[in-house]
Image: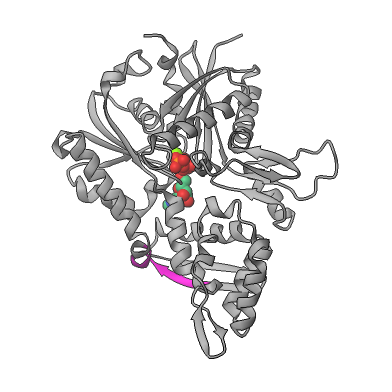
Amino acid sequence: MKNFLYGIDFGTTNSALAIYDEDKKEIVSTIIIPSLIYFPEDVEVSNQKKYVIGESAISSYLKDGMKGRFIKSIKQILSRSSFTETRIQNKRYNASDLVSLILIELKERADQIIGQDCKKAVIGRPVFFDDDDTQKDTLAQTRLNKAAIMAGFTEVRFQFEPIGAAFAYEKTLTKKENVLVADLGGGTTDFTYLVLDPSQVGSKNRKNDMMATGGIYIGGDSFDSAFMWERGTPHFGKNTLYEATPGKVLNVPKSLFANICSWDKMNFFNGLRIKKDMEDYYYYSNNDKNFKNLITLVDNNLGYSLFQAIEKTKINLSSKNTASFQYSNMEIEINENVSSEEYQNIIDKDINRITAYLEDFMLKNKIKSEDIDSLFLTGGTSMVVAVQNIFKTKFPHLTLNSGDNFKSVAKGLAYSGYLFENN
Ligand SMILES: Nc1ncnc2c1ncn2[C@@H]1O[C@H](COP(=O)(O)OP(=O)(O)OP(=O)(O)O)[C@@H](O)[C@H]1O
Ligand SMILES: [Mg+2]
C-alpha cells in the first residue's frame, strides 16, 4: 500500500479532488466534476442508481425531459440552519447526505485511479460559509465533516480554500513574496494575505506565514441572480398587471420572483403550492403572455436550462463587449443583446460590496498596498471583467496572476498534509 492523501475542494459550482502521492511528494492527478445531483423521477429498476452526479446529472436530466429533482449549488445549504431535510423518492436526505453524494463520486473516481481506498483528506472550506455568524459556520463545517465520514474518509482536516489556492501559486514562485490571494467562486469570494516561499512548500508549520484571511458571501451565483432579476424576470411577468378587484389594477407581487432567482430557493421550491395563485394572477391579468412564461417555467422545471443561458451570457461577456441572452423553449422566447456596460450595472451592487469588503479587510489587517508583492486571482468568477477591474484599480502597480481557475484550490489543499502532523 502506498501513502496517498486527497485535497478536496467541494465547491458551489465545481468540485475538484487532487490526488497527492505522499511518498513521491507530488500530485498524481486532479479530477473535477460539476457539483450537481440529479434524482430521476421514476426509478423503477431496483438495481438502477437512484441518483446521478456531475456531468451525467445534466445529460440525464435533459434526457428525462427535465423531470425529477435537479439540485445545484448544494454547498449553500450547509450553513442554513432552517434546512433540516428534504424528501426525494420517498427517502429523507439531510444536508450531509446530499453533500456526501458528491464526495462519494469524487472518492470513487480517485480510488479507481490509485487502485486503493484512500482514507485521508484535506477538505477546503470558505473563510465564512455564510456571513460571519459563528454558529452557522460551525454547523456548516460539522455537516461537511459528517459528509466526508459518510463518504468513507477517516482522517479529515479542514483548510481555508484561499490558503489552498495560495499553496498552488507558491509552487510557481521562485522567491519569497507577500501575496494577496483572491478566490472568487460560485458562492463566495475569499481573501488571504500571506508570505509565500517556494522553499516552504509542504513544510510543517505555516501558521506564522498566514497574515490574514477573510471572505464574503458573494460569487458568480449572486451575479446570475442579479441578472435574472433585472433581465430575466421581466420575461416571466415581473411587470405584469392584474385586476385585483373590479377597476383596481395592481402589479403581481414581486415576491413571486424571488423563488426563481436564487438556487438555494429554487432547489427546494415547490411550485405546486402556489400554482393556484399563479393561475388566478394569469386569469386576472387577461392572460398576460409574460406571466404565462412563469407558469411554463415552474410547471416544467426549466430553471436550470434558463440559468445555463444566463451563465453563457456572463461567460461570453468575459471576453466580448456584447453578448446575446438567448432562451427558446416551450413558447418562451428570449433573444436580446447585453453590453458589457449593462452587465456591469447589473452586478454593480455586488462589485461594490466586494470592493468595500476588500478595503475593510486591508484596513483591519493593516495591509498596505505597497507591501504586497504579488496578486493571485483564482476561481471562475475571477474572469469577470468588472471583478478584474477591482484589482486593477486598487493595485495599478501589480499584475494579476492566475493559474488554473478551477483546480488550484484542490491542488493547494493536497499540499496541506502538514495539518496531520501534531505540533
Ligand atoms: N469564463 C467565465 N467568466 C465568468 N464567470 C465564469 C467563467 N467561467 C466560470 N464562471 C463562473 O465561475 C463560477 C464557478 O467558479 P468556481 O468553480 O471557481 O466556483 P466554486 O469553487 O464551485 O465555488 P465556491 O468556491 O464559491 O464554493 C460560476 O459562477 C461560473 O458561472
Ligand atoms: Mg471555489
Display colour scheme:
one colour
Total tally of numbered discs in the picture: 0
Front-most of 407 and 307? 307
Q: Position of residue 295 (x, y in %)?
A: 64, 70
Name the image quarter holding the N terminus: top right
For residue 45, which quarter of the picture? top right
54 shown above or below 294: above
Front-most of 334 and 219? 219
Q: Is residue 336 magenta?
A: yes
Q: Position of residue 4 (x, y in %)?
A: 54, 16
Q: Position of residue 387 (x, y in %)?
A: 33, 51
Name the residue located 31 percent from the left edge and 49 percent from the top edge. Answer: 354
Front-most of 180 and 320? 180
Name the residue located 45 percent from the left edge and 55 percent from the top edge. Answer: 315
92 shown above or below 194: below
Q: Is residue 337 magenta?
A: yes
Of all residues, the one furthest to the front in this rendering is 245
Of all residues, the one furthest to the right in this rendering is 45
For residue 83, which quarter of the picture? top right
The answer to whether residue 117 is left or right of residue 185 is right
Name the residue located 45 percent from the left edge and 15 percent from the top edge. Answer: 25
For residue 358, which quarter of the picture? top left
Q: Position of residue 17 (x, y in %)?
A: 53, 29
145 shown above or below 303: above
Front-most of 14 and 170? 14
The magenta region covers 335-343
12 shown above or below 349: above
Name the image quarter holding the C terminus: top left
